[in-house]
Amino acid sequence: MDAGILVPITFFIGTAVILWKFYEGRHKERMLMIEKGVTPAEFKSGGITPFWKSNILSNLKWGLLFTFVGIGLFIGEQIHQFVEFDEESSIFACMLIFGGLALIIFYFIASKKIKEKQVNEE
């Protein structure tokens, strides 16, 4: 067979399998809800929250991480330009260092917020 025809066939078969599994899982979920006597509202209230409604500290963590990795990328490029280090290793190292620094900063901010919350609850 020609490779040009395999791509569309694979795409449509893959899409069909994904949709089939999605609807099959949804059907099983609904059957279990009926079996247990749970209403959809009760079931969704204890479920997983969507990522856009997640914990504010989680959003802070990802914001810090991406910002500092971007800063690391920029500084790695500057190091490569001015000091003539190996490009890949300097950029990768700076991204890891600044990403780790962002997570350390997040840890201190989050632990402070959690302590404040515990003090307010008491």
Image: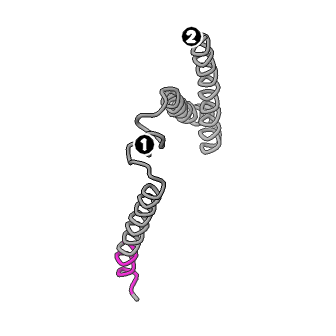
Q: Is residue 80 magenta?
A: no
Majority SS type along the magenta span = helix
Task: Give the total of numbered labels.
Answer: 2
Task: Report the front residue among 88 and 122.
Answer: 122
Q: Is residue 112 above or below residue 60?
A: above
Task: Identify the image quadrant of the C terminus.
Answer: top right
Return the disc, 1 or 2, that comes first in the chain's sequence.
1
Residue position for label 1 = 42
Choose mark 1 or mark 2, whichever is in front: 1
Image spot of residue 120 (x, y percent): 56, 10
- Mark identifier at residue 120: 2
Image spot of residue 64 (x, y percent): 52, 28
What's the residue at 35%, 81% (across, down)? 5
Left or right: residue 103 compared with residue 8: right
Task: Identify the image quadrant of the N terminus.
Answer: bottom left
Point out the stretch of residues depicted in magenta: 2-11
Task: Report the front residue among 91 and 26.
Answer: 26
Tell me which amino acid carries mark 1.
Glu
Give the class, few, some or many, for how many residues have Cα within 10 Å of label 1's Cα (few <14, many ≥20). Answer: few
Look at the numbered disc 1 and give the secondary structure of its residue: helix
Tell me which amino acid carries mark 2.
Asn
Marks 1 and 2, Cα distance to the nearest angstrom?
Answer: 30 Å
Residue 18 position by quadrant: bottom left
Image spot of residue 83 (x, y percent): 63, 32
Look at the numbered disc 2 and give the secondary structure of its residue: helix
